[in-house]
Image (cartoon, helix red, strand yellow):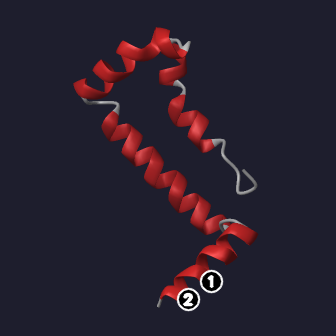
Amino acid sequence: LAAAVEEMYAEFAKDGPTPDELAVAKKQTATFLDETLKTPNFWLRRLSTLDYRGLGLDDLLDAPAQYQRFTAEE
């Protein structure tokens, strides 16, 4: 089993995700962000570190679009 898992990881590292795998990952991330952005705890954590990280509110609001721009090559 360990050898099979290592082989899968090696193949993924070499070839990257398939278009379908990337689409699924983007959909899962979009769903997660959609739910998370609605929680007070998310905003509390993010707003408390904006200045420290050199970010603005627009950066937070653009996060879903930033994740959608990822490509398999990245």
Q: Residue furthest top?
A: 51
Q: Is residue 11 above or below residue 66?
A: below
User: Taking 46 as reference, is 6 left or right?
Assistant: right
User: Taking 18 as reference, is 23 left or right?
Assistant: left
The location of residue 62, given as percent across then percent down, is: 54, 26
Pointer 2 with pointer 1, Cβ within 8 A: yes
Considering depth in this image, is 48 or 67 the residue closer to the camera? 48
User: Taking 36 as reference, is 17 left or right?
Assistant: right
Q: In this view, does 73 lie above or below 66?
A: below
| Residue depicted at 70% across the width and 51% down the height | 71
Q: Quadrant of residue 32?
A: top left
Q: Quadrant of residue 14?
A: bottom right
The location of residue 50, given as percent across then percent down, is: 46, 14
- What amino acid is at disc 1? Glu
- What amino acid is at disc 2? Ala
Q: Name the residue under label 2.
A: 3
Q: Mark 1 points at which residue?
A: 7
SS type, badge 2: helix
Considering depth in this image, is 20 or 50 the residue closer to the camera? 50
| Residue depicted at 47% across the width and 91% down the height | 1
Considering depth in this image, is 35 or 72 the residue closer to the camera? 72
